[in-house]
Structures are given as C-alpha cells and as structure tokens.
Image (cartoon, helix red, strand yellow):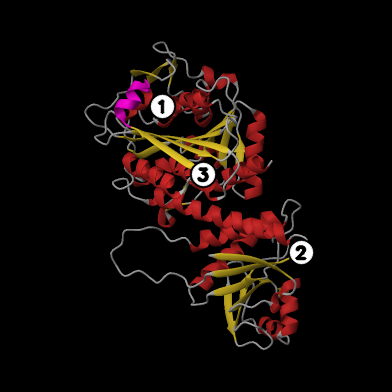
Amino acid sequence: MEFSAYSGQSVAQRSECLVIGVYEARELGDQARAVDRVVGGRIKELLRRGDFSGRAGESLLLTELPGLRGSRLLLVGLGTAGGYQRRAWKRALGTAITALGRTRIGSATFAIERPAGRELDEYTLARAAAEACGSALYRINDLKTGRRPPPPALARIKFGPCTPVGLADARRGLSDGAAISLSAGLLRNLGNLPANVCTPRYLAAQAAQLARSHRSVRVRALNEAQIRRLKMGCLLAVTRGSAEPPRFIILEHRGGRRGAAPVVLVGKGVTFDTGGISLKDPAGMDEMKYDMCGAATVLAALDLAARLKLRLNVVGLVPACENMPGSRAIKPGDIATSADGQTVEILNTDAEGRLILCDALHYARRFKPAAVIDIATLTGACVIALGAHHTGIMANDDALAEELVACGTRADDRAWQLPLTEEYGEQLKTNFADVANVAGRDGGAITAAAFLGRFTKGLKWAHMDIAGTAWLTGTAKNATGRPLGLLADFLIRRARA
C-alpha cells in the first residue's frame, strides 16, 4: 500500500474515489459540506430521501457525480456527532477500506472528519490511519483449498486534509504506520498458523529469516543441549512431555550507539499449551495455538525496529516449546531448578508460561538492559479482570509502567497497570522449594507477575499479560496484532528521544 498526505481541498485531489463521512440524523461535517457544494447539493438531497442513514458501519458508493475529479464518491457512516471520537473514527476508516476492497478501485482520497483530542496531532492520526487501513486489509493466512478471492485492487491512499505546517509530520506518521501494519501482519500470521506448522523450530526459522531480510538483525537459536548448558531447568521441565524439541531464540537489532544499554523484550513462546498433566478443558483448546503470541510480538517488534531503522539497541528473547502430557511430562509436586538457582515447586503444570519466562528473564541480565519487558498470554485471571479490552501491566518500576500505559493510550492499544506489592509474592510460599509456581485463584494475574518479579531484582522490568487482547475468539477467531501498536510507540519514542 502506498500512502501519501495532502493539504488543501479534498475535491482537488486526483484519485478514483473520494471518501467522506456522514453523521447520523443527516448531519454533514465540514469536509462533507465542502464536497456537497461542489456536487450541487446531491448529498443533502440523497440524505433527505433517506437513502443513507449515517449509522456507524454503513457505506454507500456513488458514481458519476458532477464536479469531482474522480469517478466515484464513498459515503461512510460516522454515527452520532456527539459520540464521534477516536474509536468511531477508526471504525469509519475500516468500513471505508472494507467497502473499497470489494471493488476494483485502485486509489482513494480520504477526507473523513477527524476526531477531537489534544493528543491527536498530525503524526499520531496519520500513523493510526495507516495502521487501521493495514488491519482492515489483512486476510487470515488460512489453509483452505478452495478458490481464493482476488486481492483488493486498492494500492494508493491519500490522507488528509492536513494543515500545511503538519504535512511533514503526517507523512512521517503514514510511513511509520505502514511499517507497523506490515510487522503486525507477521505477528498475526504466526499466531494464526496451526500448531503442527508453527512449532518451536518454525519460530526459530522465522527469526533466521528476519536476519536474512534485515542487515541490522542478528539471530541465534539454541537447541536443547545448549539450553541445558545454560541450566534453564524450568524451561526444560515444561518441554519434557513433548516430542518437539525446544528452542531458545536470541534476536538483536543493533541500531543504537555501540555499548548503549538495550531494551530487552521477552516473549512467551508456547506453540501449543494442553496444560500438561493439569490438562485443560477440551472446549476452546484449539485456541492454545495462540499461546505463542508473546513470542510473535517479539519477532514483529524486531522486524519493525529494523524496518524503521530505529536508532536503538533492541534484544528479543524467545523461549519456545510445547506443553504436552507425555509420559516424561512434569507432574504436580515436581521441583525444578531455574537458571538463577532458585527451586520451584510446580503445583500446576498449566502455569507453564511463567516457568519458561523466568529462565529467559535471568538470561536478559547479561545484556545490562535499560529496560526489560516480557509479553505473555499468561493468565485467564487477567481476562477475568480486564476482559479483551486492556492489556494488564505489572512492574517493579512505576515510571516504566506509566510510560507503557501512556504509549498504549496514544496508540489506541490500551493497557492498565495492576498493583504488584509484596503481599502477592507471599502467596507463593511453599514448604518444599524456594517458591511455588501458583498461589490459588485470588489475584491470579498479579501472583503470576509476582513469581516473575523474583527473577528480575535489580532490573527495570515490566510484565504485559496479553491473554485477553492477543486474539479474538468464536466465529471471529483471529490474532489481533496487539500489543505491537503499544510497543511500536514505546520503541519509536525511545529511539527518537
């Protein structure tokens, strides 16, 4: 997709289709009124007849209107004027892209009314617009054998109108947003693949492909013997029940000055999670292929850092394995020794994500990082607490947590900070080891973070629980691409500070 920004009148732009928004109750905003004057009041006439309501999600394609440089005009419903905010604006963009994708229109000029908000400058809006377009055009990488529909013809989008002063910022936003949408496609493709395709070795191969595609990225994938030499006993405990060998993947984007402390991203890479001996209910177990979305986010973040040539050192760590109930699988009550020497009593084998992450978090120390952020589909408790709307953030550094929450607000990829005080860690006490891997139902998302916090002392660390936000369920089952938008804002701002 080729994006460009424009200033001045939308009707003066050359493209095959002009896209404008219409509010409910036959209200026209400034952009729609300007277009209506050019076409001799035809839009108001159409609204008076009741041919278009302006409800959110509606669209209507008009052809052969006088005065337009393009041959078609697309009306998009904005909903009520009073409720028109950023979410409604993004929905209108998605509606427009979906409608255009059903046609053979190759180029479009967007003149949809903008939402109000002090934080929505030209750069932020343009970046969000490019991301929304990329998301609307995404097609699931399914393995169906039937005839596929042709790809959309839409190849060029003009975004605006922008102020002349903000034109350069809008162009930069569109460029960054286009890169984010490409990297989000990588994340979603990895998440949507079945677990018999997307194995730990497959993730390692995809990481190697990143290194071949981007000169700034270096990759190593450690095999089981090398993992054993690192004494990652918790990772090895989880993978024991599977015939599929584990991998520990290390990615480095060297974009900052030599020796500068990197940002380390750690992604949970359980490519399929049965729960192990603590077997999950069959209903919805197919969705456990998404338990590697943290790992996919890390690969996508490194891909993005390389695409944007961010002047920042970024390290990605991915412990990748399966959690299966084989004859050699760990059992409730077993004790494993982590890479930093702490012993862990495994009371629930379905609390495996924290086990593989604790070894990876210890490994992060060798990079002397400026910040460590782990991303994991970690707990159902976080879904109960926050639903599918906010990513849960817990941290040992409030400034880092607040920075991430602010990035999520700007990127419209929202997160919410949960408390992480010492009382939660006390729930993990056990008679038989240094720590237990679970602490009961109460505060389950936070006690999981408290477990990880034992392995991050002395580090600036934040934990992102994406169990509710990484994928959609039911008939809309699909990886969402979150929280790449949040992390993109974080990395871009850190690099350009």
Please report the residue visible at 51 percent of the width from the left and 24 percent of the height from the top: 365
- Sort mark 3 into few (<14), some (14-19) or many (20+) by Cα contacts within 10 Å: many
* Image height of 439 relative to 9, above or below: above
- Sort mark 1 into few (<14), some (14-19) or many (20+) by Cα contacts within 10 Å: many
Quarter of the image for residue 282 reads top left
Residue in front for this viewpoint, 317 or 382: 317
Please report the residue visible at 36 percent of the width from the left and 40 percent of the height from the top: 204
Residue in front for this viewpoint, 267 or 215: 215
Q: Which amino acid does label 2 sit on?
A: Thr
Quarter of the image for residue 242 reads top left
Residue 86 appearing in the image: no
- The residue carrying mark 2 is 163
Question: Marks 2/3: CA distance?
Answer: 31 Å
- Image coordinates of residue 109 in percent, x first then y, are 63, 72
What's the magenta region? 223-233
- Image coordinates of residue 197 in percent, x first then y, are 30, 48
Is residue 84 covered in magenta?
Answer: no
Q: Return the disc, 2 or 3, that comes first in the chain's sequence.
A: 2
Q: What element carries label 1?
A: helix
Classified by dominant secondary structure, the portion drawn in magenta counts as helix
- The residue carrying mark 1 is 355
* Image height of 2 relative to 234, above or below: below
Q: Which mark is residue 301?
A: 3
Please report the residue visible at 65 percent of the width from the left and 56 percent of the height from the top: 172
Q: Residue furthest top?
A: 431
Quarter of the image for residue 322 reads top left
Question: Marks 2/1: CA distance?
Answer: 51 Å
Which numbered disc, 2 or 1, marks the residue closer to the eye? 2
Is residue 228 covered in magenta?
Answer: yes
Q: Which amino acid does label 3 sit on?
A: Ala
Question: Marks 3/1: CA distance?
Answer: 23 Å
In the image: residue 476, left or right of residue 403: left
